[in-house]
Amino acid sequence: MLDAGDMFFSTKNLNKDNVESERYRASVMIEAYQKIGYDAINIGNYELLSGLKFLKSLDEKCSIPFISANLTDAKTGKLLFEPYIVIERNGLTLGIIGVTGMKPDTLKSVASKDYVESGNAFIKKLKKKVDLIAVLANVDRKEQQQLSKSFPEADFIFTSGSTNMTRKNSPQKEDGPFVYSFGKQGKYLSVLTTDIKNSNTKLVDVSTHKNKIKSINKRFERLQKKDPDKSLEEIYSSQANVLRLIDQYRLDIAKAEASLKDAVNTINFETIALSRSVKDDKDILAFVDKSLETCNRLNKSPAKNKSSDHAHKGHNHGSKISKSKKKKNKPLPSKVTK
């Protein structure tokens, strides 16, 4: 499990009234992540809001690696954190690189190198050493649209920095890289399952093709309702535009089915709504309730919002699990990649 950044703090406006509460919130978030079993955290905009000293103090106490390939000490020019980690899962080696393009302007002790150049430099370094490469990118909504062009040699790009959310039917580049965004406030768990049988063969996002087929079949059902006893061609014989649409739908289904049939290495993406129907872990729930109670007690803001009881409120940090399988399709443990 990985975090793409922007996990700390519930607001960008840290001040004397809320800073103690917000720093406590960040520290218990880290503690919770350790309990869950995260593998790495990308340093993004929110992580830097309370200054480098505070961030480093958390890094020293945390067993989860903080990563960043482009944040440097403004005086020495040296990277502040490890630029990447390498994870091994069921015979697969995964390289995880972290970048951000959203450093707070007021933070003068930290410099930010060009995140595209930095990310690509480490992709080049890792490309022949690992099976798959994922980039954790903390960038704004506009720049997220360019990420597949910015990191063409990556296999996956997981984003934070906006409230964008990837759906099952979201279009992806056929040859990758595959870009995923995760909404806001931790409302959804995104799961990416990979099945690698031949490292020399391209990855195929089967979830996109499956959902395209499902969506088109629903459209056919709606068209058929007009007269269940006739063919679609008979029903719409006088409507050339509808007939053209039907032909295109059939071509799209045939193409999607062919892609599924030919797929060797597959990706399946799904989102799970963390609604009340999801059973709580009693120990984690008790930990969260106690932590939120302490946050509210420490917050001295005169107009604090008591309903703001979510540790991720108002921002996105790209939470996801990725399960990888190789050859014999053995499932990964629950803590893998985000």
Image: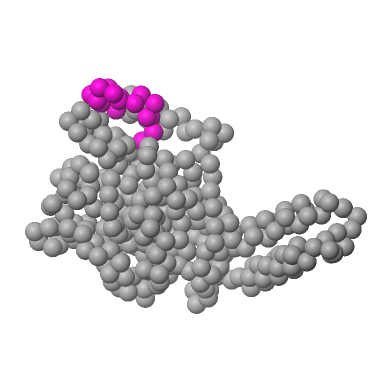
> In this image, 71 relative to 228: left or right?
left
Q: Find residue 86 and report its horizontal and vertical position in percent.
A: 34, 62
The one nearer the camera, 223 or 135, is 223
The reply to whether residue 127 is in sight is yes
Q: Find residue 210 and report its horizontal and vertical position in percent.
A: 64, 60
Q: Find residue 97 and report its horizontal and vertical position in percent.
A: 33, 62
Q: Quadrant of the rendered structure where residue 127 is? A: bottom left
Decide whether residue 308 is among the magenta residues.
yes
Picture layout, residue 259 above or below residue 12? below
Task: Give the tally of numbered discs.
Answer: 0
> In this image, 251 relative to 266: left or right?
right
The reply to whether residue 327 is in sight is no
- Give the extent of the magenta segment: 294-311
Q: Residue at x 24, y 61 (%)?
A: 70
**Render colour scheme:** one colour
The one nearer the camera, 248 or 31, is 248
Q: Find residue 54 and report its horizontal and vertical position in percent.
A: 18, 42
Query: Hey, which residue is sitting farthest right in the picture?
Result: 229
> In this image, 239 relative to 254: left or right?
right
The one nearer the camera, 253 or 120, is 253
Q: Residue at x 91, y 55 (%)?
A: 229
